[in-house]
Amino acid sequence: MPEIDKKYPAIIGNDIKIDYIGVLDYLRDNIDVPYSNPDAPGLAAEEVSRLLEVKKKGQNAIAELKKMAKTFAVKFKLDKCMSMSWLDGSNTKTRRYLWVQLKYGKYADNPVSVAVLVAKNSNDTCYRVSLEIKNNGTNKELMKRYHSHLDIPLNTAAGLVYISDSNELGNTNILDKAQDEIKQEVESGKLKKVQICKYIDRKPDETNVYYHTEITKAMAYALART
């Protein structure tokens, strides 16, 4: 494992142009907001104005996520980025979480990626960086290969945790168990998917530099497991 803290020091720079805090604020205030096509006939002017504002806010948040994707792609020499959207699958309301997925282009067909997710936890919105895999339709051999990250000791000092049961809401369960026990439960099928991740919670003196620094280091840890 590389010495991440030496490779990516605590202070990366004060000229960060990404509004990490704004994305957290956006999700906090804009979950499940109803939406429809503002160009549809018969809409009242007030409703058109509301819909355009919803669209503008969502597009602004995605623009910041795209900046993150570009920045991290350059830093880690990643060249495959998944599509992003502020609308849910039905296109009738805003999403309950936002995320950026990145991977190396030579592994384009591999379902494993590194994800930066913006979600709401029990208290507030937060960032979560994880080693992700598309488990729907992924065969057992690929899942076994993915779970080989459980063979490497977990760097808890860096704030890394194991989680399970990630779902559409962005919710997860932190596994407070010994690593060997988790491996056994994966092998037995009791646990279908276990991710390694780091939560980056909000704090009173938060800055965009703080989030940039912590997400960068968390991505480096996750990529070291690929």
Image (cartoon, rainbow, N blue to C red):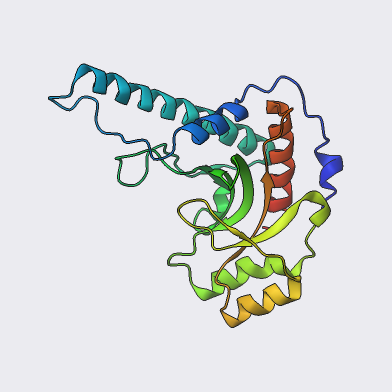
Kindly indicate the quadrant of the structure image that contains residue 156: bottom right
Q: Residue at x 58, y 73 (%)?
A: 191
Residue 79 pos. (x, y %): 57, 42
Q: Which residue is more in the foreground, 141 or 136?
A: 136
Percent x, y of residue 31: 44, 38
Residue at 60 percent of width and 43 percent of height: 123
- In the shown orientation, is residue 158 left or right of residue 123? right
Residue 112's x, y, as percent?
Answer: 56, 58
What residue is at 18 percent from the left and 20 percent from the top? 44
Give the percent coordinates (x, y) of residue 42.
12, 24
200 and 106: which one is in front? 200
Asked if 41 appears above or below 200 in the picture, the reply is above
Q: Quadrant of the N terminus?
A: bottom right
Q: Residue furthest bottom?
A: 188
- Does 13 appear above or below 140? above
Q: Residue 151, located in which quarter of the rendered image?
A: bottom right
Q: Is residue 199 left or right of residue 36?
A: right
Q: Is residue 56 visible?
A: yes
